[in-house]
Amino acid sequence: MKPSFPLPAKVNRQLDRPPRKRGKQIHARSTGKDQVPVLVVRDRSGATADFKLTAIDKKTIELPLQAILAKDAIFCSDGAAVYRSVAYKPRNYPSSRQPRCQRLPYSER
């Protein structure tokens, strides 16, 4: 899960953008300059961890996942392309029955 939150500008006395009005929608779909990507991870026991990311790419997402997940963990995601580049996907499934849960390849590194 990788939501994006508006970047707060309360601390800065000089804004590099025009001020926003309250309740005004920022960018509906993309992560623009004024939004921060966040990675939220939850396990089956209910423990939650969140990480502020600088970008949404393989390098940035791989480091927090390595630190928190076990070597034999099975990673279930929303199927975003960046997760497919991080996780190992078994190849013995037919393409119509490919699971979204994937084993992470940390033991192979």
Image (cartoon, rainbow, N blue to C red):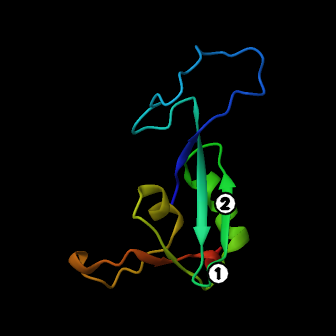
Q: Amino acid at mark 2?
A: Asp
Rendered residue at 67%/33% (across/down)? 8
Label 2 residue SS: strand
With respect to residue 66, does 2 lie above or below? above
Label 1 residue SS: helix
- Residue 50 got which mark? 2
Q: Nearer the viewer, residue 26 or 56?
A: 26
Residue projecting furthest to the left:
96
| Quadrant that contains the C terminus | bottom right
Q: For mark 1, does the 10 Å Cα neighbourhood hold few (<14), some (14 to 19), or many (20 or more) residues?
A: few
- Residue 107 got which mark? 1
Rendered residue at 33%/85% (across/down)? 92
Rendered residue at 59%/72% (across/down)? 42
Image coordinates of residue 56 in percent, x first then y, are 55, 47
**Residues at marks 2 and 1, CA–CA distance in whole angstroms:** 24 Å
Image coordinates of residue 100 in percent, x first then y, are 38, 74
Image coordinates of residue 4 in percent, x first then y, are 54, 45
Image coordinates of residue 27 in percent, x first then y, are 44, 32
Residue 12 picture quarter? top right
